[in-house]
Image: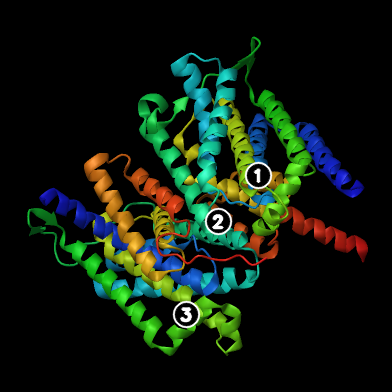
């Protein structure tokens, strides 16, 4: 137990130190922007990891909730006169309700069937966003009003760096603590064997649904944050490729590891930025790096590296 | 009636392509348990290589053969360099590897070819054939006929040759297949090669109708996967039926209800089918051992 508690503390401490120290080494505001993007994506990935890594259920349509969060803060103020902060909460609530309603029938499915059902959900949401252009601006996207909190207008890349960093820290803290609650233990039981979990009295359907709703709320909040930060959104944020990107972050970093999800997000966001110097070879290299990383670190970056460190320390 | 037939033919044509992609998914899934998200890239390669070989002055038939050979080579390389080294990794890790492969192949195609849309001439002219008032492109018959030939050839191969039976044995139980002396690694390589060939054929047949570019693979992989799941993962008959059904749903949905929401009907029906039959239409019920 002590070791576990320490590990939890360690993850939070590493994250807090990294967030606090990075600004001192950033040469320009461009770096603040990229880092904020990492924090936002990491928030969605940490949430998805609760569903995939802890509860062991796949979602190939998670960007749908990201998109709902993003479009809620865009449509709320622009079309309905709702203040931005309230729109953010409504977006999260909408995502939770949708996840709850759809999750009930969907989560009965297993493995690849669950994957295609969540994928279908993602495609449907993205399609509605793209098509209802009088509300959403269609494929071109729409502008987002800046977030104003108690008269303070949240803007500027360094401000957003701290806001998103803080959000990620809180999200990580909750995810880490969840692991140690009865709910977290039920998730892990589900992950290992659904039948066995059911036999020992875990209400399988309820806990799966809980994990799905929690993951949806994480993604929705991340989507809202990105929309505020960019001041503009388009349907790609809700699309299939973004869903795949989120899953890749979680798996690449290490399924089940909270720190892994953050590392996975960092790799997948910064790598394309770094690879732009290779111009047309960018995608080729990105694909190659994903393949090589998964072959040599098949449990993901963080679990593979930490087991390597442990082995080194022992010998 | 004419309208109905029109939608029927366009649905069947698109559905045949989905069926071939789904069949490719099924072949690889059965032999190796891998869901290959790079399946759509084989379709892209089939179309793109043919276009560029034909543009270089090579006769269409020869260009098509070169394209199939190229796709098979890529399929074998994918198995040898990316799937085989990761043997024993979890299903989701393998899926991410194939997603990486699809990003890589798309990037490669953008460099080797270009980012433009390309068209192939229809094999036997562009004059539509009138069938009870519906104007059907001759190329549609090529797509449907080609699909039928591929499905028939695959059936004969699986049911009436020793190698085919080894593929079926590997699909049924990999360990047992190895115990009776089947080289399952060779079978897997065969499945990747065969699946690539099927994908490439689909790409060649459909390019005169739908055009092709370096990034057509993603959407096709998504639809093919959906078709395979609709029919029941791992069942070749289910893959073909699922593909045709998906194409018909899209065509009739677009024709009679709303063209902007054509993808929505297909996925709505998939969701409803899965709610009622969680293993797809023809899927086997799996019992989990504890």
Q: Which mark is residue A110?
A: 2
Disc 1: CA contacts within 10 A as few (<14), some (14-19) or many (>=20): some
SS at badge 2: loop
Q: Is residue A13 above or below residue B101?
A: above
Marks 2 and 3 close (CB-CB < 8 Å): no
A85 sits left or right of A22 in the view: left
- Closest to the observer, B33 or A165: B33
As helix, strand or loop, the secondary structure at mark 1 comes to helix
- Kindly identify which chain the residue marked by label 1 belongs to: A
What residue does disc 1 label?
A: A207
Residue to which mark 3 is pinned = B168
Mark 2 and mark 1 lie on one chain; the one further toward the N terminus is: 2
Q: Position of residue A122 (x, y in %)?
A: 48, 43
Specify the quadrant of the image occupied by residue B21: bottom left
Residue A204 is left or right of residue B275, and the answer is right
Residue A303 percent coordinates (x, y)? 76, 56
Q: Chain of mark 2?
A: A
Residue B58 in view here: no
**CA separation, marks 1 and 3?**
38 Å
């Amino acid at each position: 137990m002590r070791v576990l508690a320490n590990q939890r503390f360690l993850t939070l401490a590493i994250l807090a130190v990294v967030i606090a120290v990075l600004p001192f080494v950033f040469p320009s505001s461009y770096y603040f922007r990229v880092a904020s993007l990492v924090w936002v994506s990491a928030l969605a990935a940490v949430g998805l990891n609760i569903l995939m890594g802890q509860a062991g259920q796949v979602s190939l349509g998670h960007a749908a909730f990201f998109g709902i969060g993003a479009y809620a803060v865009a449509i709320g103020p622009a079309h309905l006169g709702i203040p931005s902060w309230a729109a953010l909460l409504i977006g999260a609530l909408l995502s939770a309700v949708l996840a709850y309603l759809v999750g009930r029938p969907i989560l009965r499915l297993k493995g690849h069937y669950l994957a295609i059902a969540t994928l279908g959900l993602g495609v449907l949401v993205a399609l509605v966003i793209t098509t209802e252009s009088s509300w959403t601006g269609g494929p071109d996207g729409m502008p987002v009003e800046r977030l104003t909190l108690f008269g303070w207008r949240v803007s500027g890349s360094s401000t957003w760096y701290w806001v998103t960093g803080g959000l990620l820290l809180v999200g990580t803290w909750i995810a880490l603590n969840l692991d140690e609650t009865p709910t977290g233990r039920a998730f892990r039981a589900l992950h290992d064997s659904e039948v066995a979990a059911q036999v020992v009295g875990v209400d399988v359907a309820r806990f799966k649904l809980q994990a799905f709703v929690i993951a949806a709320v994480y993604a929705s909040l991340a989507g809202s944050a990105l929309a505020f930060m960019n001041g503009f959104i388009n349907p790609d944020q809700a699309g299939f490729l973004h869903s795949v990107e989120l899953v890749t972050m979680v798996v690449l970093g290490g399924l089940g590891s909270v720190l892994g999800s953050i590392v996975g997000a960092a790799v997948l966001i910064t790598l394309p930025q770094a690879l732009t110097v290779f111009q047309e070879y960018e995608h080729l290299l990105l694909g190659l790096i994903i393949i090589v990383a998964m072959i040599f670190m098949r449990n993901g970056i963080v679990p593979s590296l930490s087991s390597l460190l442990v082995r080194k320390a022992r010998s | 009636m004419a309208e109905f037939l029109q939608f029927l033919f366009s649905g069947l044509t698109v559905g045949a392509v989905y069926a071939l992609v789904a069949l490719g998914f099924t072949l690889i899934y059965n032999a190796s348990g891998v869901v290959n998200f790079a399946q759509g890239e084989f379709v892209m390669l089939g179309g793109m290589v043919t276009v560029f070989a034909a543009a270089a002055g090579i006769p269409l038939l020869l260009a098509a053969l070169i394209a199939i050979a190229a796709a098979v080579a890529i399929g074998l390389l994918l198995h040898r360099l990316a799937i085989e080294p990761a043997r024993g990794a979890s299903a989701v890790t393998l899926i991410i590897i194939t997603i990486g492969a699809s990003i890589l192949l798309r990037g490669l195609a953008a460099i080797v070819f270009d980012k433009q849309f390309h068209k192939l001439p229809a094999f036997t002219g562009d004059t539509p054939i009138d069938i009870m008032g519906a104007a059907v492109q001759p190329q549609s018959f090529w797509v449907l006929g080609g699909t039928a030939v591929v499905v028939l050839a695959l059936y004969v191969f699986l049911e009436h040759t020793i190698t085919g039976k080894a593929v079926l044995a590997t699909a049924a139980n990999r360990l047992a297949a190895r115990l009776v002396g089947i080289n399952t690694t060779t079978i897997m390589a065969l499945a990747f090669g065969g699946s690539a060939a099927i994908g490439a054929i689909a790409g060649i047949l459909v390019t005169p109708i739908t055009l092709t570019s370096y990034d057509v693979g993603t959407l096709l992989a998504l639809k093919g996967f959906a078709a395979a799941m609709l029919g029941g993962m791992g069942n070749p008959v289910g893959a073909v039926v699922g593909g045709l059904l998906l194409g018909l749903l899209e065509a009739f949905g677009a024709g009679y209800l709303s063209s902007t929401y054509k993808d929505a009907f297909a996925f709505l029906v998939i969701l409803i089918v899965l709610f009622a039959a969680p293993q797809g239409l023809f899927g086997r019920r799996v019992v989990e051992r504890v």
